[in-house]
Image: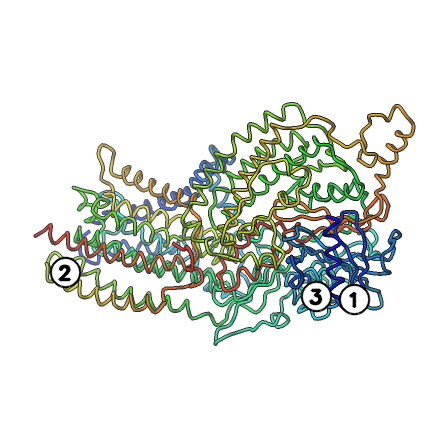
């Protein structure tokens, strides 16, 4: 890691000697450099195409309001920092680039020409921080309503409803909001008619049974053919990132459960990996294996929801009932271990909340033997069905290159034939000790995405089986004083530990200042938490990079020139969750 | 009741009247029993809760009208086969060969429109897979 | 021969048809539930049998909504059309010897005509709603039902060739030796598919396609007017099942049991098949459906007709 760190930023400096780069060493070891706003485009272009072993993917783009941050040793002065995370597959490494901006001139060049995926990310930064991106094709709010005043992730923006006066919705306000939501084709450069036939502009969602939540897609239709599509998101936005700045490190865990609400502990997992990197906590082996087992169970649970609803989107009514029954079985295990089902809130800083209950092995083994035959049955029922194939094969195709360009990760990326799985490539929590395959497919169409997910469930069963067979003994939580709630081993024996325990429980742990990215292979793709600590009991900035966000951004690409039913097939095959898009 | 031509249709007529009464009665009954309380949201056409862009009365893609034209062509052609099917036994082999010629003519037209691509509604979707 | 007591036959058949159609709602929900590992309606009355009654009362007591933007007369007439056309078809169905409203010598043509008229209901409903989803649903319905109509008629001509009559009673009598399912298996398959398409049942429910078009042509309908589409669909299922029974499975004929029982048994079997299809199949895309109809079904129907013609001639000479 250290060797390449030197070379990545070095190569950049070597190529652009006139540009002054300021290096920063981040706690997570990702090479980090500050670059001047004027040179963003050329540096990005070089990193994407010029450099050997290029950074092909724009992994994340976000901002930090630095104005009240205290611990910024060695960092250039900045009011709002725009942070780019790039990912290189050849190097198997991220690079973090930061741009310092000042309140009198919150503006920098857009990189949408280099990475089309930057489009939505830049809109989000504009929405949340009020940073202008010059040359952006359509810079407007993306998550907040268009009528919103202020930029929510700025530190001076209220964080709680109680700071804003009671909410009221008189009729004229409702009308104003509805009018603001009306779609104007001209604003998106769309024609109203062609060759004597009028295009139909159709709102699909937010109240639509096929969109899996409050998602709105505006379709430009020629008969049934989709000429263009504009996804409109933000209806499910709950300010999860802003909440992270108010909750203590520990009490934020349940909020993460609600981001990808089908992924359960997957969210805890990514968040805690980042926190543990910041706090320097080593998680004991038993806790790591418990985490993996629960994560894989949740991968199955999430994929089962996808499987059933995907078939339902294509008009097949029954599979959803079968897969939900199986999901209930898996939830039985989750409930026995965690006490909760969809939102287990089970992982803790430094481990998990409690040890596994008596009899857990029998339950898990029971599920392992029950589940694979069921999967075979669904293969015959769904995957082998000719109408199902007719609806999915060759629909919504994308190449690996397009997928990387648009920030696609997870099963969707692997369906294009690119065997990139963060569990294998950047193992965390001990995945390197497990035997499993990375399923891939060839064409990157809806059918292949389905195949990959189904095979992934089989691999998850394999991993769970290994967890049961080789569950290590030992503590389920780290003895580190920052682990919370701390273990009570010695609290009643010496006053020092008692005081630490008391403070840690009442205030929450104080995490040393620094920045860290924790990224995992979640159910839908790469889920990353980029945390900034200012040395307090809560996070200074919590950035949640979710897989569904870039996937949804790809939608127009995948369904242009196709028919309305294909839109539903593509939506279903992408496997997104609205809370995961909007946060 | 004498079994003449009209007598067969009389029950049908009575049936039509009764069925009409049943259908209209259902509409009427719900009009009588049902209540009406219009609100602003109800008065707008359903488009997933969003203000619609334009309305549904627009010039529609010509592809759909083609189907209707094809239907008229082929249904008329098919109708000629109905009486033929009834009296084929009386027409014997002559009728059979005649119909072969007729169907061949229909098929020529059929393959012509097939090759012209009139029967392909979404060409992109047929690239790989399909039925 | 036509029933000597027309009023008795009319009311009898109407009541039975409407009861079966509404009862089907319960049967379908229970059957689907059985196949999908759940209970279905089981609370209202014994086995949830009164659920249909409760639903009817609910539908009647609902707001009688006619959207102000709709084409009002057409909007009201559309659901009535489907009820009338389907119920009219029942007039020519011979349930058992003597149990028929009107024994026409062109009964088969009458049935085809009525099912063609049924398309109007869907198209007018979609058009008059002035809603884009409804319009798309209506247009889909028109294209789909027109396409499947072409070969629906053709698929039955094999039966006509064999029996030499359009009269359904004669067709049943012609099956005394052998049910037409044996010589006309292809015709049966084609008619079953066309029948599914005509009743807009899964896998041919594209005009509704709740996951795409949100109920399509009847998005704007509520209350009893929606209920009429609903009942119309089940009446259609009953009708097509009855037609299959008559045309391919010897109608009321069968040993031991009384004719009417045989008829109902056979009919309910096909109703069950319809429901099973709905439980198991996904929905094809519009273009696939159309390509299927024109490129596969139509040539097959023509081939079936010619082969049957040749066999009939060879057999009788």
Q: Residue at x 85, y 41 (%)?
A: A510
Identify the image quadrant of the C terminus of chain B: bottom left
Q: Is residue A495 left or right of residue A19?
A: right
Residue A297 marker? none
Please, which residue is most extreme toward the bottom here?
A196
* Left or right: A199 in relation to C22: right
Query: Please, which chain is the residue tagged with disc 2 on?
Result: B
Q: Are marks 2 and 1 in contact (CB under 8 Å)?
A: no
Residue designated by label 3: A140
Q: From where the camera sits, is residue B32 visible?
A: no
Instruction: Pinpoint residue C236: horizontal percent, then vertical percent.
Output: 37, 50
Along the horizontal axis of the image, is A241 left or right of A548?
right
Relative to residue B101, is residue A59 depicted above or below? above
Answer yes or no: are tags 1 and 3 on the same subunit: yes
Gap between marks 3 and 2 measured at Cα:
71 Å
The numbered mark 1 sits on a residue in which chain?
Answer: A
Q: Could you say which is closer to the camera, residue A371 or residue C179?
A: A371
Answer few, some or many: residues within 10 Å of disc 2's Cα (few below 14, many 20 plus, some between 14 and 19): some
Residue denoted by label 1: A19
Q: Nearer the viewer, residue B57 or A475?
A: A475
Q: Earlier in the sequence, mark 1 or mark 3?
A: 1
Any part of residue A300 in sight: yes
At 52% from the left edge and 74% from the top edge, which residue is drawn? A193
Around disc 1, counting alpha carbons within 10 Å, would you say few (fewer than 14), some (14 to 19), or many (20 or more)? some
Looking at the rendered structure, whether the residues under marks 2 and 1 are on a common chain is answered as no
Label 2 residue SS: helix
**Residue B96: numbered disc:** 2
Query: Callout 3 environment at 10 Å: few (<14), some (14 to 19), or many (20+)?
Result: some
């Amino acid at each position: 890691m250290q060797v390449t760190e030197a070379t990545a930023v070095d190569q950049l400096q070597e190529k652009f000697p006139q540009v002054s780069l300021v290096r920063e060493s981040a706690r997570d070891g990702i090479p980090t450099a500050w670059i001047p706003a004027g040179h963003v485009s050329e540096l990005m272009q070089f990193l994407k195409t010029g450099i050997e072993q290029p950074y092909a993917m724009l992994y994340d783009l976000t901002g930090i309001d630095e104005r009240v941050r205290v611990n910024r040793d060695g960092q250039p002065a900045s009011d709002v920092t725009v942070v780019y995370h790039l990912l290189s597959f050849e190097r198997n490494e991220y690079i973090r680039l930061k741009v310092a901006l000042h309140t009198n001139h919150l503006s920098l060049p857009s990189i949408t020409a280099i990475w089309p995926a930057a489009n939505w990310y830049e809109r989000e930064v504009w929405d949340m921080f009020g940073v202008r991106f010059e040359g952006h094709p359509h810079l407007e709010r993306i998550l907040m309503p268009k009528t919103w005043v202020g930029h929510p992730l700025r530190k001076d923006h209220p964080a709680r409803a109680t700071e804003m006066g009671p909410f009221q919705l008189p009729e004229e306000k409702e009308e104003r909001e509805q009018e603001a939501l009306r779609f104007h084709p001209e604003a998106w450069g769309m024609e109203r008619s062609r060759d004597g036939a009028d295009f139909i502009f159709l709102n699909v969602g937010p109240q639509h049974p096929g969109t899996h939540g409050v998602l709105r897609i505006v379709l430009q239709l020629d008969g049934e053919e989709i000429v263009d599509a504009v996804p409109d998101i933000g209806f499910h936005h709950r300010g999860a990132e802003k909440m992270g700045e108010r909750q203590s490190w520990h009490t934020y865990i349940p909020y993460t459960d609600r981001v990808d609400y089908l992924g359960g502990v997957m969210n805890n997992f990514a968040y805690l990996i980042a926190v543990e990197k910041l706090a320097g906590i080593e998680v004991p082996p038993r806790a790591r294996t418990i985490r993996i087992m629960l994560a894989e169970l949740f991968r199955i649970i999430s994929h089962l929801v996808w499987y059933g609803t995907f078939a339902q989107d294509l008009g097949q009514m029954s599979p959803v009932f079968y897969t939900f029954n199986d999901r209930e079985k898996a939830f039985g295990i989750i409930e026995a271990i965690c006490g909760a089902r969809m939102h287990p809130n089970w992982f803790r800083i430094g481990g998990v909340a409690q040890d596994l209950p008596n009899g857990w092995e029998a339950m898990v083994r029971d599920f392992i033997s029950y589940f694979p035959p069921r999967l075979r049955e669904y293969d015959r029922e769904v995957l082998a069905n000719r109408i199902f194939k007719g609806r999915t094969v060759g629909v919504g195709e994308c190449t690996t290159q397009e997928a990387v360009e648009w920030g696609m990760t997870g099963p969707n990326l692997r369906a294009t034939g690119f065997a990139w799985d963060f569990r294998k490539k950047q193992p965390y929590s001990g995945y390197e000790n497990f035997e499993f395959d990375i399923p891939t497919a060839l064409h990157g169409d809806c059918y292949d995405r389905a195949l990959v997910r189904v095979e992934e469930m089989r691999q998850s069963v394999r991993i769970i089986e290994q967890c049961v067979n080789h569950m290590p003994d030992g503590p389920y939580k780290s003895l580190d004083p920052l682990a919370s709630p701390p273990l009570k081993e010695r609290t009643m024996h010496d006053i020092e530990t008692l005081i630490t325990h008391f403070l840690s429980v009442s205030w929450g742990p104080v995490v040393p200042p620094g920045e860290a990215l924790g990224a995992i292979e979640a159910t839908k793709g790469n889920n990353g938490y980029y945390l900034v600590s200012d040395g307090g009991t809560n996070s200074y900035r919590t950035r949640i990079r979710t897989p569904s966000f870039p996937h949804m951004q790809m939608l127009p690409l995948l369904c242009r020139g196709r028919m309305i039913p294909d839109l539903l097939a593509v939506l279903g095959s992408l496997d997104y969750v609205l809370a995961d898009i909007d946060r | 009741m004498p079994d003449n031509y009209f007598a067969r249709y009389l029950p049908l007529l009575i049936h039509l009247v009764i069925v009409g009464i049943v259908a209209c009665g259902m509409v009427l009954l719900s009009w009588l029993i049902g209540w009406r309380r219009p609100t602003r949201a109800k008065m707008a056409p359903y488009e997933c809760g969003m203000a619609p862009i334009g309305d549904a009365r627009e010039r529609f893609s010509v592809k759909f009208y083609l189907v209707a034209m094809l239907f008229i062509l082929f249904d008329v052609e098919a109708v000629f086969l109905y009486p033929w099917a009834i009296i084929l036994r009386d027409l014997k082999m002559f009728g059979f060969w005649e119909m072969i010629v007729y169907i061949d003519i229909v098929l020529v037209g059929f393959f012509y429109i097939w090759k012209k691509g009139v029967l392909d509604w979404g060409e992109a979707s047929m690239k790989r897979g399909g039925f | 021969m036509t029933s000597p007591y027309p009023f008795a036959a009319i009311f009898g058949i109407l009541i039975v048809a409407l009861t079966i159609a509404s009862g089907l709602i319960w049967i379908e929900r229970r059957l689907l539930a059985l196949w999908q590992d759940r209970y279905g309606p089981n609370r209202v009355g014994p086995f949830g049998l009164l659920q249909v009654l409760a639903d009817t009362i609910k539908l009647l007591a609902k707001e009688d909504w006619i959207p102000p933007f709709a084409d009002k007369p057409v909007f009201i007439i559309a659901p009535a059309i489907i009820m009338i056309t389907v119920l009219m078809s029942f007039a020519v169905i011979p349930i058992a010897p003597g149990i028929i409203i009107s024994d026409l010598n062109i009964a088969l043509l009458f049935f085809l005509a009525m099912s063609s008229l049924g398309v109007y209901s869907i198209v007018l409903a979609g058009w008059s709603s002035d809603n884009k989803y409804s319009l798309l649903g209506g247009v889909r319905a028109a294209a789909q039902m027109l396409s499947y109509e072409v070969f629906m008629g053709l698929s039955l001509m094999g039966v006509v060739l064999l029996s030499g009559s359009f009269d359904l009673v004669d067709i049943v009598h012609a099956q005394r030796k052998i049910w037409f399912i044996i010589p006309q298996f292809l015709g049966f398959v084609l008619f079953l598919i066309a029948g599914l398409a005509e009743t807009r049942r899964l896998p041919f429910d594209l005009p509704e396609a709740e996951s795409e078009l949100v109920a399509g042509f009847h998005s704007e309908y509520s209350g009893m007017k929606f209920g009429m589409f609903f009942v119309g669909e089940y009446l259609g299922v009953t009708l097509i099942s009855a037609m299959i029974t008559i045309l391919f499975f010897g109608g009321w004929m069968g040993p031991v049991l009384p004719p009417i029982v045989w008829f109902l048994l056979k009919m309910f079997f096909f109703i069950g098949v319809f429901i099973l299809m709905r439980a198991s199949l996904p929905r094809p895309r519009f273009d696939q459906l159309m390509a299927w109809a024109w490129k596969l079904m139509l040539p097959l129907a023509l081939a079936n007709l010619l082969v049957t013609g040749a066999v009939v001639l060879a057999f009788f000479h």
